Amino acid sequence: MNRSTRKKTLRTIIYPRLALIMLAILLIFTLFAGYLAKQFIYRQSEDNLKEVSKMVYSYLSTSENTSLDALQQSLTMITGDSFTRITIIRDDGLVIADTDKDPALLENHGDRPEIIRAFRGIPNSVIRSSDSLDLDMFYFARSFNFPGRVESYVLRIAMPYTQLHEAYRIIYLYIGIGSVLFILLSIVLFLFIDRKIEQPLAVLAHTAHQYADLDFTTESLSVTQSVEIQDVFTSMRNMALKINEQFHDVNAQKEALQAVLDGMSEAVLVLDDTGLVIQTNPAAQIFFGSSVGDSLLEKSYQQILVHTELDEIIERYLQFPHKEFARKEIKVQLKAMFFQVHLSRIGLEDDKHILIVLNDITALMHLEQVRKDFVANVSHELKTPVTSIKGFTETLLYSDLSKDQEKSKRFLSIINSQSDRLQAIIDDLLVLSRLEQSRDRTKDFTPIDLHQILEDAIQICKEKPGNEHRQISIRCDRSQTVTGSSLLIEQAFINLIDNALKYSDDQHSVSVVCIAGDQAVRIEVRDQGYGIPESSLDRIFERFYRVDKGRSRDKGGTGLGLSIVRHIVLQHHGEVSVSSIEGKGSVFTITLPYDGKHLSPAQQD
């Protein structure tokens, strides 16, 4: 709404429009009344000419002296001093009598329009200029016959049109007087509207401005006979009382919320739609205050949260203010501290803000790093003795034992099996240890034939004992390529395909399907096996997590395969997910970008 529109009053809005409406009504009335008056005068004048023609016709029908001189004198006597003109025209157009001019001086009238129609038997009237008198005349003409004569004649009665003009002037005078009275009554109406409507509305507007300024103390009510306006005043007062109560309730809730925020150990930041901090809490001030000065308010998030991934997510929230994103939870390192960051939207539909909650997990991350280091060190320490145990076990297993050979072989077989298990755990721990290093492997990535990688992984899995006759299908474009480490990607698919074979019956098939997108390719490993309970889906990629520990041990699982898959995919800036229905099978999905870079926001979502 522009400035001029905001300043318009009720008077400037209604009065000009009302005046235009009244002027339009006045104009329409004037034109209509003038038209009716002219039509009335015209009909009256026409009726007068008809009456004169009847009188003249009656005289001519009964007159015994029909000489032209006698006829001229008789007609002149009939018209007397009036403005009426009587003309008689013979069927050849010759004027034989006229009250205003000598007939001998008049030209032939056979071409006059009223004469032509009259000879056709059509009485008619017309207004036109007279060629003989050089002025506008109102004519009425009709045909007749003299008694005892064969010729046809036309009797034409005329009067000057100026006589009608005089009548019109009187009518217009009366219409003008009526218009003036109408305008005066309109002014009285405007004054009435001003007193009965505009003034009470002005009081109403003043009261509304006070309420808008949160001043609810005024109780002024306009004294008006309008029930509607009085009801508006009463409703506004009741509304103001309720708003005042709600205002106090909102303030109380705001103070309670601020108390909660002040007591939180997590840092809280609220950003507006431009990325500026509009609300915070003391914890955030403690964590980030030293980097931007005394206060975080009105500071850009980029000054406070200097982290590439976090800044990209916030930027997506700001670029698409009406798009609903899934609740984001990421771990970030800001300087020497680690935070678990939760992002979500808050506020109304048209005024949404971004809520950022940062939980300090620096101590937890330190413990996690200690645990990782411990696993790596222990794995290296265990590798040599486990290898030695395996070597002695194989020697004893195939030696010729003289005493209780069958029992010795059984024990040695168990030792060998557990040694293999320890070896697999150590190998997997070493793989995880290498993958969890923060080194960027992107510079080592090369183009990979995805179809070939999948075929190799399937072949390796089928070479394991018991899998020779298992059915594994692949549906992937032979020209499909991605960028990454071929050994790591192959290992990831070996783990997924091996899991699909282990946790499904022999008669069930396993399928691998590639689905190409605009920015990434999605590879799905599908089985028809035992499935995964819904409660375990969120933890399936954790190290050492097993859905069924007994079954996993029987199948030779270490509990590290899916964790290795997850780390390999993350190394390639991709995503891995699982969907499963217990008892019907599972689908593990790996999404890899073509260029080995981070997935776009649309692809991630």
Image (cartoon, grey):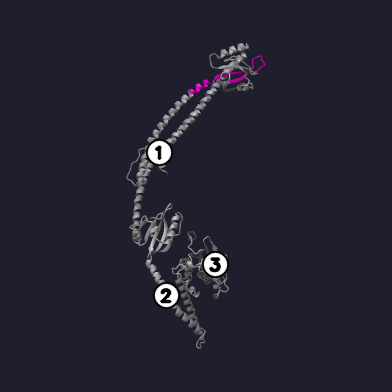
C-alpha distance separating marks 2 and 1: 85 Å
Q: CA distance from mark 1 to mark 3?
A: 75 Å
Identified by mark 3, the residue type is Leu
Marks 1 and 3, the one that precedes in the sequence: 1
Instruction: Count neighbours of disc 3 (C-alpha within 10 A) and say few if under 14, some if 14 to 19, many if 20 or more.
Output: many
- State left or right for residue 424 relative to residue 100: left
Q: Position of residue 104 (x, y in %)?
A: 61, 14
Front residue (pair 324, 1) = 1
Position of 234 with respect to 129 (left or right) is left
Residue under label 2, please give it. Answer: 377
Residue extending farthest to the front is: 443
Indicate the position of residue 50 as horizontal and vertical percent values. Answer: 57, 20
In the rendered image, residue 260 lying in the magenta stretch gets the answer: no
Circle on res. 10 = 1
Q: Which residues are magenta?
A: 140-169
Q: Is residue 555 above or below residue 273?
A: below
Amino acid residing under circle 2: Asn
The answer to whether one can see residue 288 in this image is yes
